[in-house]
Image (cartoon, helix red, strand yellow):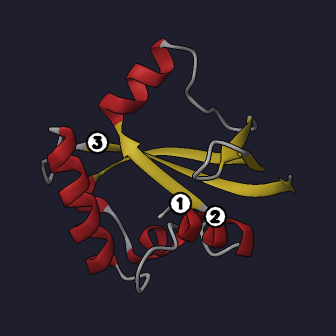
Amino acid sequence: MFTLRKQLVLSGIKTATCCSKTSFQREYERGEAPCAGSDNIILDGTGQPMCVIQTVRLQVIRFCEMTSELASKEGEGDLSLEYWKEGHKRYFEREGTYSEEMKLVFEEFELSEIL
């Protein structure tokens, strides 16, 4: 999984990610949440620095309002909204936060540097 994400980020196919607003708030309280313009080091599956990304946009949207355009920016599967919804529904159910009305923080980023 981490190898695939690495390839997707480094190739420019994956230019976004998202999390539940609940998860984002926990990161924010720890001082770990991204903000527009911030740089973040992405680690590979072994914990080694892989690349630096810069957050270019954050937006709050509801799960049920996800669009095909945004879903494809996550670069997963066949890039379809249906694939995105299936995978993220399972993920958020495991996290215990899933609902069609749940709020997500959607982060768009650019690859700044390969390490």
N-terminal label among 1 and 3? 1
Q: Looking at the picture, which amino acid does disc 3 mark?
A: Lys
Above or below for 51 versus 6: above
> In front of the other: label 2 or label 3?
2
Q: Looking at the picture, which amino acid does disc 2 mark?
A: Lys
The residue singled out by tag 2 in the image is: 6
Any part of residue 101 in sight? no
Q: Residue visible at 44% across and 81% down?
A: 79
Question: Does residue 47 appear to the left or right of 73 in the view shown?
Answer: right
Q: Residue visible at 37% across and 82% down?
A: 80
Residues at discs 1 and 2 in contact (Cβ within 8 Å): yes
The tag on residue 21 is none
What is the C-alpha distance between the residues marked 1 and 2?
6 Å
Q: Position of residue 99 (x, y in %)?
A: 12, 48
Tell me the crowding category of disc 2: few under 14, some 14 to 19, or many 20 or more residues within 10 angstroms, Cα based.
Answer: some
Q: Position of residue 115 (x, y in %)?
A: 86, 52
Above or below for 55 versus 108: above
Residues at discs 1 and 3 in contact (Cβ within 8 Å): no
Question: Does residue 103 appear to the left or right of 93 in the view shown?
Answer: right
Helix, strand, or loop for circle 3? Answer: strand
How many marks can you see?
3
The residue singled out by tag 1 in the image is: 2
Question: Does residue 10 appear to the left or right of 3 in the view shown?
Answer: right
Image-quadrant location for residue 19: top left
Q: Residue visible at 44% across and 50% down?
A: 18
Tell me the crowding category of disc 1: few under 14, some 14 to 19, or many 20 or more residues within 10 angstroms, Cα based.
Answer: few
Q: Nearer the viewer, residue 27 or 65?
A: 27
N-terminal label among 2 and 3? 2
Helix, strand, or loop for circle 1? Answer: helix
Q: Looking at the picture, which amino acid does disc 1 mark?
A: Phe
The residue singled out by tag 3 in the image is: 103
